[in-house]
Image: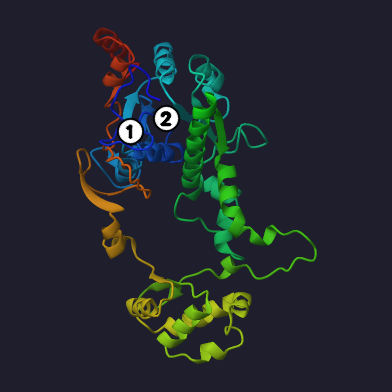
């Protein structure tokens, strides 16, 4: 898939299944950048195009050092950076030339903005008919909400995610950017499918998705289980998620899920509670599901005066699914996390020592070692040279305030 003249720097130091694929990203925050980070982790070359004024605001969110946040450092590892005024005539020409070399282009503008900038699908496909073009928006290309701005919090509200967290009480945010993240996962999976189809058909495709559709689709099977079977004679049972909660111990919290009869016997044996085996509400799996809330209440009473780690040790010994509710400062030191290397400490040339996650999927054929996230515009000159700009032309673009 590599075209003649393609630069051989992928933003990573090793090969991966997407080696040779070039991705161009114009987007900020999480939904699009998170997905292109995943593509970089699988070997793709990712070029992040940022504006000249602020760039991606994520650079400034949260704990930071030397102008780069840890959030940005994690989510933009493996990318090259081009800082440019894409609304200017020279900037538009550079973008057109860059997109002519790309396999994938992802943008997260509100509907109509990309077209006004000359980077809508029709314009891009004139020079690059095989490109996979990705459009991400808050609510979709059309419809009553299509022109509205949207961030993760807005979508948590519209999708019902916040309502589900509160059950019958006050809605609550999930304190992680779930709609943004699931949108990232959704579009990257779709892009890989589109690239696979392109190998068979020779044609590029247009992948469209919204944060709202991604969030609703993601949450529907479980969170909306009570709103799925519509027949009047349906056997409606208590929603298990309504009582999906942690159990308070003497010095912390645990999560446990004793679903099978063997699990339930393990709980009874671990805490010397034979009465749990004879209580008709809990004696078998069917009644336990029907009385799930009572079961959780009873388990809470069982562990209330026991130390967290003691609860975990007893239940692990009994082969019952259990975990401590680890605090953020405990996660990196967890033995399994350390063993897998999913979080590691590295020296970042800008931020200094940081904890950085690696992508969860590992490939036996090679998983790239990602380049560190870079300063805005760190690769501008190199990318322009690859596109045929002379040193004098690059200097003129910089003097005219077109690039940084």
In the rendered view of the protein, which quadrant contains the C terminus? top left
Which residue: 47% across, 42% down? 184
**Left or right: 264 in relation to 140:** left
In the rendered view of the protein, which quadrant contains the N terminus? top left
**Left or right: 229 in relation to 177:** right
Per the rendering, the mark at residue 25 is: 2
Q: Secondary structure at mark 1?
A: strand
Give the Cα distance between marks 2 and 1.
10 Å
Q: CB of mark 2 within 8 Å of CB of mark 1?
A: yes
Q: Tell me if I can see residue 211 in this picture.
A: yes
Q: Earlier in the sequence, mark 2 or mark 1?
A: 2
Front-most of 59 and 226? 226
Rendered location of residue 259, percent (x, y): 52, 74
Residue occupied by mark 1: 79
Q: Is residue 189 above or below residue 100?
A: below
Residues packed near mark 2 inside 10 Å, few (<14), some (14 to 19) or many (20 plus): many
Front-most of 375 and 312? 312
Image-quadrant location for residue 303: bottom left
Q: Is residue 255 above or below residue 385?
A: below
Which residue: 25% across, 52% down? 344
Rendered location of residue 59, percent (x, y): 33, 38
Rendered location of residue 105, percent (x, y): 46, 27
Rendered location of residue 271, percent (x, y): 42, 87
**From this viewpoint, which residue is outermost toward the right?**
232
Q: Secondary structure at mark 2?
A: strand
Image-quadrant location for residue 310: bottom left
Q: Is residue 198 above or below residue 349?
A: above
Per the rendering, the mark at residue 265 is: none
Residues packed near mark 1 inside 10 Å, few (<14), some (14 to 19) or many (20 plus): many
Q: Tell me if I can see residue 334 in this picture.
A: no
């Amino acid at each position: 898939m590599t075209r003649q003249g393609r630069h051989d720097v992928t933003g990573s130091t090793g090969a991966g299944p997407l080696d040779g694929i070039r991705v161009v990203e114009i987007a900020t925050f999480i939904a699009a950048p998170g997905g292109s980070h995943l593509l970089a982790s699988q070997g793709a070359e990712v070029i992040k195009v940022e504006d000249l004024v602020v760039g991606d605001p994520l650079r400034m969110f949260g704990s930071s050092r030397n102008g780069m946040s840890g959030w940005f450092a994690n989510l933009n590892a493996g990318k090259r950076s081009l800082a440019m005024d894409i609304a200017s005539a020279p900037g538009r020409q550079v973008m057109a030339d860059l997109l002519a070399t790309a396999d994938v282009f992802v943008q997260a503008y509100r509907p109509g903005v990309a077209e006004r900038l000359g980077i809508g699908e029709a314009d891009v496909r004139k020079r690059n008919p095989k490109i996979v073009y990705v459009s991400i928006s808050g609510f979709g290309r059309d419809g009553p909400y299509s022109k509205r701005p949207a961030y993760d919090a807005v979508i948590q509200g519209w999708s019902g995610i916040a309502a589900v967290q509160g059950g019958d009480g006050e809605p609550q945010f999930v304190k992680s950017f779930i709609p943004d993240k699931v949108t990232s996962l959704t579009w990257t999976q779709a892009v890989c499918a589109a690239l696979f189809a392109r190998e068979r058909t020779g044609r590029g495709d247009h992948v469209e998705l919204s944060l709202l559709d991604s969030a609703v689709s993601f949450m529907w099977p479980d969170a909306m289980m009570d709103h799925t079977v519509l027949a009047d004679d349906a056997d409606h049972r208590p929603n298990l998620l309504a009582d999906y909660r942690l159990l308070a111990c003497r010095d912390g919290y645990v999560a446990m899920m004793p679903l099978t009869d063997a699990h339930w016997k393990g709980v009874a044996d671990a805490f010397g509670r034979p009465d749990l085996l004879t209580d008709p509400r809990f004696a078998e799996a069917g009644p336990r599901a029907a009385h799930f809330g009572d079961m959780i209440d009873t388990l809470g009473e069982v562990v209330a005066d026991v130390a967290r780690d003691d609860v975990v040790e007893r239940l692990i010994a009994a082969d019952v699914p259990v975990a401590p509710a680890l605090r953020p400062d405990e996660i990196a030191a967890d033995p399994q996390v350390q063993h897998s290397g999913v979080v590691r400490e590295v020296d970042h040339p800008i931020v200094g020592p940081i904890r950085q996650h690696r992508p969860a999927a590992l490939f036996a054929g090679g998983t790239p070692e990602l380049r560190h996230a870079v300063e805005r515009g760190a690769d501008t000159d190199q990318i322009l040279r690859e596109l045929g700009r002379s040193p004098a032309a690059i200097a003129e673009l910089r003097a005219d305030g077109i690039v940084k």
